[in-house]
Image (tube, helix red, strand yellow):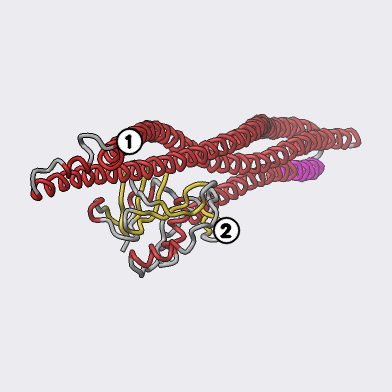
């Protein structure tokens, strides 16, 4: 009897020991799995943060590149305008040389005519001789002949006088032309100086923006490297999780198989012992063995349920993280789409071309400021036109190139006060009589020029 009980206790101890080993193995695997899942979740959160940073950097890069492209385009236009101005200055210089030559020739002819007239007058009225007026009168055969001779002398004098006056008028006109061409050449040189200053400023701005772009490139490379590290960590921990889940399943299956084998062995031992005792003792021992077997089976079932619950929790956590990431991406897309919408508005215009011209002339003498739009504190050529028309409720672009397409085109023969005259790299407002008002240069400021065609006109646009 005692021997039988010892065998029963030993079988129960073996079963319990196997169950404890299996549970311990499962608990250790669960801890490693939990650690791997936690590290993977942290890496995923970090990766989301880095991806957000990468998105921000790329967005800033895109905006910065757009600024650089705009500055490059403006620089190209400025360089082209400088080249055009150089050609116009060369043409003006040739024009000035010709005007000076014409002036010298006119002055020479004036001097020659004056000397010729003095000589004839001297002979006729002072020196005497065969052609003197006195001799002419004394040598007349009759009164009619004397009158004819006097009339001839007067005609010669009138001719000389008229020729001298004509030469003097030519000299005056030529001097005015020389002065006008000189002023126009100076205005073109001022504009060239302004454009060269703009070119230098644009080059500096592009260099600064390029440095910023290099910084963004460095930041982006660092963020991408960090993202690659987090992706590697996620991959490694996913592998660890897969291995731990597989190990737990294998351990659970092995424990279940071992437990089943031990139960079978214990049942065989109990059956052998029961066969050597009375039917009552056998029945009691068999009942005890069934109870022990039932307890072991329940313990195994609980362990397997615990493992299944742990695995389910891990899957749920991973699914929630993925859902959160997807939701975040959706929100970001929605926000980006919303922020990209924009609208344009236009002002209601009222006024007339003459009113525009009169208003613009009020600001003659005020300073020229590149990029400015203030009629009192300073404006450049297109800023001046924009500010003048803004007073009449018209919204115009701050660009001499873009002003070529506003309103509608008119020909030079149809020009009226208030029309916008566009040149290469410059713009002005026509005020009538061949004159314009414009922000000419830093040296000249806002001024009136009396020859609208002092440089090549590329477009004439009318608003009213």
Which secondary structure, mark 2?
loop
The residue lying toward the viewer, choosing from 342 and 367, is 367
- Is 17 located above or below residue 283 in the figure? above
**Left or right of 384 in this view: 378:** right
Q: Badge 2 is on which residue? A: 377
Q: Which of marks 1 and 2 is nearer the N terminus?
A: 1
Q: Which of 46 and 406 is in front in this view?
A: 406
How far, Cα to Cα, is label 1 from label 2? 57 Å
Relative side of 195 to 155, left or right: right
- The answer, for residue 227, to whether it is visible in the render is no
> Was residue 314 drawn as part of the magenta stretch in this picture?
no
Q: Where is residue 321 in the image (x, y as percent from the top left)?
A: 62, 46
For the N terminus, give its image quadrant: top right
Hey, which residue is sitting farthest right in the picture? 2
Q: Which residue is drawn at 34% across and 41% down?
A: 171
Q: Which residue is drawn at 23% across and 44% down?
A: 157
Above or below 184: residue 417: below
- What residue range appears in magenta? 281-298
Query: Mark 1 Cα within 10 Å, few/some/many (few <14, many 20+)?
Result: few
Tell me the tag on residue 115.
1
Predominant SS along the magenta part: helix
Picture residue at 69% right of the left edge, 32% below the top: 244
Membership of 284 in magenta stretch: yes
Q: Element type at marker 1? A: helix
Viewer-closest of 19 and 27 = 27
- Residue 6 in percent (x, y) is at 89, 34
The reply to whether callout 1 and callout 2 are in contact (CB within 8 Å) is no
Question: What label sits on residue 26 in the rendered view?
Answer: none
Q: Could you say where residue 336 lies in the image, as x and y percent from the top left?
A: 51, 51
């Amino acid at each position: 009897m005692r021997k039988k009980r010892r065998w029963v206790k030993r079988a129960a101890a073996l079963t319990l020991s196997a169950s404890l080993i299996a549970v311990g193995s499962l608990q250790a695997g669960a801890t490693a799995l939990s650690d791997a899942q936690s590290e993977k979740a942290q890496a995923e959160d970090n990766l989301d943060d880095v991806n957000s940073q990468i998105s921000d950097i790329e967005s800033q890069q895109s905006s910065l590149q757009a600024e650089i492209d705009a500055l490059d385009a403006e620089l190209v236009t400025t360089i082209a305008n400088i080249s055009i101005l150089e050609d116009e200055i060369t043409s003006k210089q040739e024009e000035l040389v010709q005007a000076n030559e014409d002036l010298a020739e006119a002055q020479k002819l004036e001097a020659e005519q004056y000397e010729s007239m003095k000589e004839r007058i001297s002979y006729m009225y002072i020196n005497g001789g065969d052609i003197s007026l006195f001799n002419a009168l004394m040598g007349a055969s009759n009164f009619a002949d004397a009158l004819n001779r006097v009339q001839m002398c007067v005609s010669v004098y009138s001719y000389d006088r008229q020729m001298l006056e004509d030469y003097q008028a030519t000299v005056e006109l030529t001097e005015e032309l020389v002065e006008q061409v000189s002023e126009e050449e100076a205005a073109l040189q001022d504009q060239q100086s302004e454009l060269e200053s703009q070119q230098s400023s644009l080059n500096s701005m592009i260099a600064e923006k390029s440095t910023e772009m290099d910084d963004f490139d460095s930041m982006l490379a660092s963020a991408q490297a960090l993202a690659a590290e987090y992706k590697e960590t996620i991959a490694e921990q996913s592998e660890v999780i897969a291995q731990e889940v597989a190990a737990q399943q294998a351990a659970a299956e092995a424990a279940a198989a071992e437990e089943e084998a031990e139960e079978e062995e214990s049942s065989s031992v109990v059956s052998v012992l029961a066969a050597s005792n009375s039917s009552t003792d056998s029945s009691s021992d068999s009942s005890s063995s069934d109870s022990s077997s039932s307890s072991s089976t329940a313990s195994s079932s609980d362990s397997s349920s615990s493992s299944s619950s742990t695995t389910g929790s891990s899957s749920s956590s991973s699914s929630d993280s993925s859902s959160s990431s997807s939701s975040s991406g959706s929100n970001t897309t929605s926000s980006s789409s919303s922020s990209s919408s924009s609208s344009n508005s236009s002002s209601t215009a009222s006024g007339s071309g003459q009113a525009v011209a009169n208003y613009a002339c009020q600001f003659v003498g005020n300073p020229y400021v590149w990029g400015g739009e203030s009629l009192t504190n300073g404006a450049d050529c297109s800023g001046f036109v924009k500010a003048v028309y803004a007073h009449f409720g018209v919204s115009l672009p701050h660009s001499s190139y873009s002003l070529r397409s506003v309103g509608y085109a008119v020909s030079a023969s149809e020009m009226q006060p208030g029309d916008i005259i566009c040149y290469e790299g410059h713009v002005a407002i026509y005020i009538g009589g061949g004159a314009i008002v414009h922000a000419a240069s830093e040296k000249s400021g806002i001024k009136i020029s009396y020859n609208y065609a002092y440089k090549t006109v590329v477009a004439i646009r009318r608003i009213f």
